[in-house]
Amino acid sequence: MIGSITNNVLTAYRSGLAPQAVGIPWKRSATVFFDGVTAVALTLYALFISDFLDTLNNVLTLSVAVLGPSMALYGTDILLRRNRYDGEQLHDETPGSRYWYRHGVNWAGVGALVLGTAAALLCVDTPVLVGPVATAPDGACGHRGAGRDATRAVRSGAAAHQLIRPAVNR
């Protein structure tokens, strides 16, 4: 029991760093408290309101709508740059960095991710959400399974290619 508590203290400390790392100007105690309240609320929901395995399955199923386009975006960026990145510049978080873009955000990449996720959500077919294109006649999103996922990845990659090419070539 002591080991479990010790492990969770370190996990809570680490999870309190995440909001600060993305720029939320809260004290560490506030971020850890917020994480704790959120975790307890999600746990209570999973235990008493919903079926935990169904909820987990739905979250994992819908996560593909974001993970597929993000992997396509990453793959497209690797191909456009021919996998040549400057490691020191990647870790440079100052406005003079090669990868700083506009205020620290590559808005073309964000746009490609949003478009890819939107396209994936249009084609998603889950118990929680069925996209309008998924209910269209056969062939609109490709077949169920890997073929449809490959179609989403290709669409996301094509959008990424068009949106981030100017940023890569600068």
Image: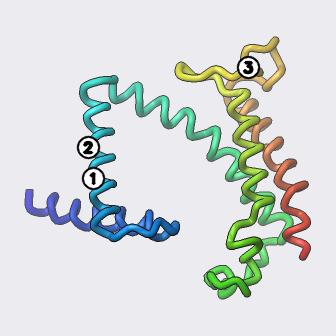
Residue topped by disc 2:
40
Question: In percent of the image, x 85 and y 69: which residue is there?
Answer: 167
**Residue 11 in view of the camera:** no
As drawn, the residue found furthest toward the left would be: 1
> Callout 3: few (<14), some (14-19), or many (20+) C-alpha neighbours within 10 Å?
few
Q: Amino acid at mark 3?
A: Pro
Tell me the element at label 1.
Answer: helix
Up the image or down, 76 lies above or below 61; here it is below
Residue topped by disc 3:
132
Residue 67 pos. (x, y %): 62, 46
Q: Quadrant of residue 129?
A: top right
Question: In percent of the image, x 62 and y 81: which residue is there?
Answer: 93
Mark 3 or 2 closer to N-term?
2
Residue 2 pos. (x, y %): 8, 62
Residue 40 pos. (x, y %): 26, 43
Q: Which mark is residue 36?
A: 1
Q: Amino acid at mark 1?
A: Gly
Residue 22 in the figure: left or right of residue 67? left
